[in-house]
Image (cartoon, grey):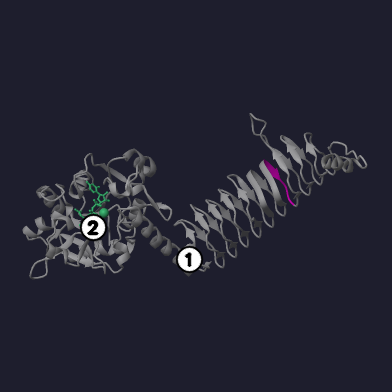
Amino acid sequence: MEYTEVKVVIMAAGEGTRMKSSLPKVLHRAAGKTLVEWVADAAHAVTEKPILVYGNGGDAILQKFGDAFEYAYQAQRLGTGHAVMAAKDKFLKSNYTVVMAGDMPLIRPETLKRLVDEAISTDCDCMLLTASPENTPAYGRIIRDKDGHICRIVEERDATQEQKRIKELNVSFYCFKTTALLYALEQLRPENAQHEYYLTDCIQVLYAARKDVRSIKIDNMQECMGVNTRVQLAEAEAALRARINEKLMLCGVSMIDPANTYIEADVEIGQDTLVYPGVVIEGKTKIGSGCTIFQGSRINNSIIGDGTTVENSVLLYAKIGNYTKVGPNAYLRPGTNIGDHCRIGDFVEIKNAIIGDGTKVSHLTYVGDAKLGEDINIGCGVVFVNFDGKEKKITTVEDGAFIGCNTNLISPVNVGKGAYIAAGTTVTKDVPPDALAIGRAKELIKTGWAKGRYKIHRE
Ligand code: UD1
Ligand code: CA
């Protein structure tokens, strides 16, 4: 079916008072995306660019989303009907207008597509989504006439005791014929408990005008879960996370305890990679196949090859090759680019550094602003002294060099191919290929000195 004539309005201007936050509600994140981005994902099943109705804190929204949306500004929050009116100019010319709540991130693209397909194929004036979950949340109740036609929606606050017992609820996703919507919006009056223009009142207007209002029932109750409080935000997060993990597992990723594995929506992971509990993988991270990611790792916007192991480490915008071992307790910061078959051990921090294949940085080392070749051995406790208090400078180490323990490499400096730096050396001058550099204070031995000292202490 062609959807060129369908416009989608996402209502996102509400105050979100119950979130108790300075951030607009729809900018709160669940499983790595803002609530409204999850809603927009579903909208993309029927439109390229949804219309976002925004209000308070709008600058943050415009800045964040740029041209992902068309925008309509709702200056005052006078209700969901008023929100849709604010977008009128943008959908006026479409044949169908879909309206979505911006605070319901679990709605699936398939469900929205079904809503629109049914509206178009039945040629009705309004198709809306309803649900009858086990526990009835404080949603609008669907009222039907004696022939079973939907005649109105009553908000929980305006409902009588008897109406509150109705199990069929308004989920807040609608597909209107645009002409019918425009007609109904004109008639809305704020005569209700909240003195707002309710979008839901469009239904009784259409019913009175003998228009055809129909509904489809949602299959999966989870999809009608709205986020109004932080408690519900955490529930939505858990549900979205479970979806992400299930999809990955069905594609061949193993998880020991998916309920405790935190992977964001845009992460890609290859087959036969095993993820331990307590791992956080964020942003546009891409992990190859056959890797093992052990407990306690946080991997943000990083790229990892095949067969690599990461244990209890933090990776930020880092790139790691194949069959490399990282951690435990490594900290790989932006600009880290590590090759294949490397070893990055415990308490190693790397920043803005290229590390060639087969190079080992096994313990207690800082590598910053450096270029290291292949098959280099960096001893324990080596410091790349990259900052002189004013500027950061680059250190280079060529293939096959050996950097002894507790060496300081004062940048800018170059260590040539196959050169050897003795332990404890402070390197300030370039070291030619195959040379030895040794720079230590001369060791002095005073026989019996310590014994004498202990004697003084004892007295
Ligand atoms: C709404 C429905 C209710 C439905 C429920 C499902 C109405 C009157 N009620 O109630 O029938 O069962 O959703 O979740 O529509 N918004 C604006 N501008 C406003 C007011 C709200 O943009 O002036 C936006 C909010 O940001 C939110 C959405 O509209 O994304 C829904 O508003 P909310 O106040 O949460 O409505 P509910 O009380 O949940
Ligand atoms: Ca709501």
| Residue 41 in sight | no
Does the residue tagged 1 have its C-beta within 8 Å of any atom of ligand 1? Answer: no
* Residue found at the far top of this picture: 390
**Place of residue 57 in the rendered image (x, y in percent of width and height, measured from the top left):** 32, 40
Disc 2 crowd, CA 10 A, few/some/many (<14, 14-19, 20+):
many
* Quadrant holding the N terminus: bottom left
The residue singled out by tag 2 in the image is 172
Would you say 201 lies left or right of 276 here? Answer: left
- Tag 1's secondary structure? helix
**Place of residue 356 in the rendered image (x, y in percent of width and height, measured from the top left):** 70, 50
Q: Residue at x 73, y 46 (%)?
A: 381
Amino acid on which the number 1 mark rests in the picture: Pro
Q: Residue at x 32, y 53 (%)?
A: 229
| Residue 152 in sight | yes
* Quadrant holding the C terminus: top right
**Place of residue 362 in the rendered image (x, y in percent of width and height, measured from the top left):** 71, 52
N-terminal label among 2 and 1:
2
Amino acid on which the number 2 mark rests in the picture: Ser
Q: Which residues are magenta?
A: 369-374
Gap in angstroms between the C-alphas marked 2 and 1? 31 Å
Q: Looking at this view, is 281 or 16 the one in front? A: 16
Mark 2 or 1, which is nearer the eye?
Answer: 1
Would you say 275 lies left or right of 379 here? Answer: left
